[in-house]
């Protein structure tokens, strides 16, 4: 597929550090292949931040794939240990020979990202490797804090924001997205022998976890569990909305788009009677484009964002406040550029996004 004008402008951005143009292109390809929703939302970011977002996503994707690789020589635990070594090398300024490693080394240095944040992600992957299950919603949120809120916190730092209140709302958004992912993938996970739904909720509905894994089936009882999980996600989506106003104006549409698209996945699950076993909910290109356009609208009056962080995510915020940056990492000119009222610039971006989405949909139809 040809590169869009958005991607060409990104490639024209200044390079430096460990990662070069080929590395940035490889990271961009990882997100295009790995997450349509995140890729669509990321196109609303300014080019420099978009490139950092792709690098961060590529490392996360690489890490997840490494742990899931059934041919890993030393098994899942060995894969996590190797990832921990690669993370240490990135922080030491001597990254391993890979595009994602080089990109990560530049990102963590440029944006003063505490090592505790990507280390939390690897902790969550270690929990996956161990086949951990979760008794309560709080236990599940602790998992979401590691595999999703850690990424949200890192993205907030990439945007130049270290306000604990904004970070708390970014962590809320991460957990909400992870709960949505779990609700969407119930059947797919069960067929792979994985179960993330709170065990206590299953037992309350008379569902035996082992029996469900042996023969996954969509039932009214399971639908109630999935609906309950989506209700918890909706509470966190509402809390997260108030933090978007604390981001640089040029970044707000992208994060709001991600929030709207993921929440729409939950709505699609609900429209299908909360059946995530026999089918997988998707947000079509037309609806996704409408949500991207909605993300460009100005936010409502700034809501109260002083609610305390979730207990399960507080350690991430503490890690940031314990490591203040040596200096302001994001120039004010970059933070103020392309605000929501730059209508012409934002419309050009959305038109380009629509073209990208149409091309992707056409390729999907050809492959099916």
Image (tube, rainbow, N blue to C red):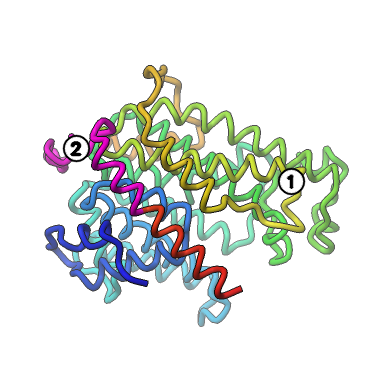
272 displayed left or right of 118: right
Question: Is the N terminus in the top left, top right, bottom left or bottom right quadrant?
Answer: bottom left
157 displayed left or right of 14: right
Residue 123 vertical position relative to residue 323 in the rendered view, above or below: below
Q: Is residue 267 magenta?
A: no
| Disc 1: which residue | 272
Give the total number of marks visible in the rendering. Answer: 2
Q: Secondary structure at mark 1?
A: loop
Residue sitting at x 78%, y 38%: 224
Tag 1 and tag 2, C-beta contact below 8 Å: no
Residue 309 found in image quarter: top left
Q: CA distance from mark 1 to mark 2?
A: 41 Å
Mark 1 neighbour density, 10 Å: few (under 14) some (14–19) many (20 or more): few
Q: Residue furthest right?
A: 206
Mark 2 neighbour density, 10 Å: few (under 14) some (14–19) many (20 or more): some
**Percent x, y for residue 320?**
30, 38
**Percent x, y for residue 227?**
72, 38
| Disc 2: which residue | 335
Nearer to us of marks 1 and 2 is 1
What residue span does the magenta drawing correspond to? 324-352
Between 143 and 253, the one lying in front of the other is 253
Q: Is residue 226 visible?
A: yes
Q: Is residue 315 visible?
A: no
């Amino acid at each position: 597929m040809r590169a869009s004008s958005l991607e060409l402008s990104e490639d024209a951005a200044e390079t430096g550090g460990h990662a070069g143009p080929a590395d940035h292109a490889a990271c961009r390809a990882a997100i295009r292949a790995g997450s349509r929703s995140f890729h669509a939302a990321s196109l609303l970011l300014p080019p420099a931040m978009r490139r950092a977002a792709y690098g961060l996503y590529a490392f996360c994707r690489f890490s997840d794939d490494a742990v899931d690789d059934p041919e890993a020589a030393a098994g899942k635990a060995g894969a996590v240990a190797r990832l921990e070594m690669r993370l240490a090398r990135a922080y030491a300024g001597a990254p391993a020979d890979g595009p994602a490693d080089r990109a990560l080394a530049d990102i963590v240095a440029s944006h003063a990202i505490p090592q505790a944040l990507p280390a939390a992600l690897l902790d969550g992957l270690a929990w996956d490797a161990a086949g951990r299950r979760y008794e309560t919603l709080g236990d599940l949120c602790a998992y979401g804090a590691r595999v999703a809120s850690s990424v949200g916190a890192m993205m907030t730092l990439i945007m130049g924001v270290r306000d604990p209140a904004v970070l708390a709302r970014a962590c809320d958004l991460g957990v909400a997205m992870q709960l949505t992912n779990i609700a969407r993938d119930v059947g797919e996970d069960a067929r792979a022998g994985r179960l993330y739904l709170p065990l206590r909720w299953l037992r309350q509905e008379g569902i035996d976890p082992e029996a469900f894994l042996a023969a996954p089936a969509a039932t009214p009882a399971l639908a109630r569990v999935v609906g309950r999980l989506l209700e918890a996600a909706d509470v966190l989506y509402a809390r997260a909305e108030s933090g978007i106003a604390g981001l640089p104006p040029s970044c707000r549409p992208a994060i709001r788009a991600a929030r709207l698209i993921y929440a729409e996945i939950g709505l699609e699950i609900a429209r299908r009677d909360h059946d995530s076993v026999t089918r997988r909910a998707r947000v079509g290109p037309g609806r996704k484009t409408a949500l991207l356009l909605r993300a460009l609208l100005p936010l409502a009056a700034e809501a109260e964002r002083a609610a305390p962080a979730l207990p399960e995510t507080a350690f991430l915020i503490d890690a940031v406040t314990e490591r203040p940056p040596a200096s302001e990492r994001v120039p004010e000119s970059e933070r103020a550029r392309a605000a929501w009222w730059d209508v012409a610039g934002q419309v050009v971006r959305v038109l380009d996004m629509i073209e990208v989405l149409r091309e992707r949909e056409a390729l999907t139809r050809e492959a099916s």
